[in-house]
Image: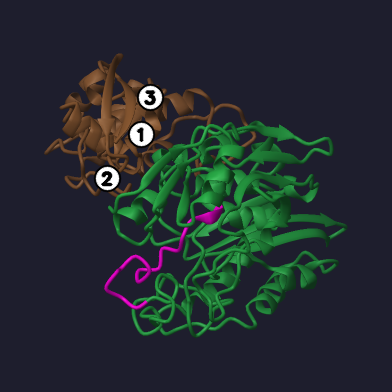
Amino acid sequence: MVEVQLRVNGTAHRLELDPRVSLLDALREHLGLTGTKKGCNQGACGACTVLVDGERITACLALAVQYGGREITTIEGVAHPLQQAFVRTDGFQCGYCTSGQICSALGMLAEVEAGAPSAVTEHLAEPAVALTDAEIRERMSGNLCRCGAYNGITDAIRETAGVPS
Amino acid sequence: MRPFAYVSAPDVDTAVRAIAEQPGAKLLGGGTNLVDLMRQDVERPTTVVDISSVPLTGVDELPDGGLRIGALVRNSHLAAHPLVRTRFPVLAQALLSGASGQLRNMATVGGNLLQRTRCLYFVDGAAACNKREPGSGCDAIGGFHRGNAVLGTSEHCVATHPSDMAVALAALDAVVEAQSVRGTRRIPLVELHRLPGDTPHLETVLDADELITAVEVPASAVAATSRYRKVRDRASFAFALVSVAAALDVEDGAVSAVRVALGGVAPKPWRAYEAERVLTGAPATEESFRAAAEAELADASGLPGNDFKIELARRTIVATLRQLRVEGGAA
């Protein structure tokens, strides 16, 4: 067992963990924070997306012992207008992917704010990126929605970013 | 997942000592490939040496204008770096075309180079795979091999190296720095990965106790006019069927400098020296681009399910060079 101090949503938790425990399982099974979902458990679906020091990662491929002392934010620690926007635009149906979509979108909007380019950004040398629908879709490709609510998700993100459609 | 001993290494010295002392140890960076393969029982380290907090995270400008990139720089951070975007746009584009936003925030430069193939049979414990279990055979050759290689293969293995980043680094003459308890050495990136031959389980020239500490990209004028073009089954978050990293300078209508490397088609990032030889000094025309592509793929050999890649690779080389000629680079 390995001792690790996880800081989640502003609260520190001291845990004794088998090093095999993923950050996802530590959140869900050890801390009872079940808002973060387990989908594929192999980094392909994005349902387990959380923020670490403000950056989005898939918690299923992270070993919990690697993330001691980092600032982890799960959906339980998020209160953001993007959530209202998802409701308004029908950005979900069953809701299973939604917490991952929201955490991923918040991380993504911070990346755009910092001027980070994407694979569809035409001129990489330009320091700022215009958040077109093509940019939103490319940047959110790590989050699958089996209900197919992608149009609503794109609308919610665009509205929240203050981009006219 | 099998149990393992966990060692958190705060610095390079601790890490290289730990892997030297523990045969069967594996280095853990971002975890995006290793954790997945451990869960699938393909990787079975007895000790995991966690290097994710070792401070190899700098992207530093070299005196000549090149870059020294720490092995633990995250893929997303490297892609967003202003000097990468302006001087080596092919590298930024290659990084950004790989995986997803979340995975690029986790994946490291060193781990990206050492990631394992995505051949379907490599990760299927019930299948024969000479890479996973030497001598067991290759189920890909008679099976589903749409994603597999057409260059540099052997009768024992047709797996591809899946990295996008490494393809750009191959085109850019990058050099890998590796450290062990015996010291530090530098390896040209194009010599880091081996072809499978009859030992497909040996994938690189690194010793088991060596740690990649940095990648250096030398200054290059032609790199400013460069692009990465990736062809895949869906628009995003998929491995390449074929990809091309290229840089092109034209003077008075003739090719004055050119770099080409291919991804998705070979067991290693494939530097297209033959295409470069044909192109250098030739008129920068569609005909020259096609001739270069033909020359590079002359020895390609496909299987029934993936021989389409040979013509796809030729056309993608031509399309990338044409785009560089007409529109310039991606910066």
Q: Which residues are magenta?
A: B113-128
Residue under pointer 1: A65
Q: Is residue B125 magenta?
A: yes
Q: Is residue A76 left or right of residue B40?
A: left
Instruction: Specify the amino acid type for callout 2.
Output: Leu
Work out whether residue B223 can be spotted. Answer: yes
Q: Is residue B29 left or right of residue A140?
A: right
Residue under the image location 65 percent in, 48 percent down = B181
Report which quarter residue A96 is drawn in.
top left
Instruction: Specify the amino acid type for callout 1.
Output: Val
Residue under pointer 3: A164
Mark 3 residue crowding within 10 angstroms, few (<14) / some (14–19) / many (20+): few
Q: CA distance from mark 2 to mark 3?
A: 25 Å
Q: Position of residue B284 (x, y in %)?
A: 77, 64
Residue under pointer 2: A144
Work out whether residue A90 can be spotted. Answer: no
Q: Chain of mark 2?
A: A
The chain shown in brown is which? A
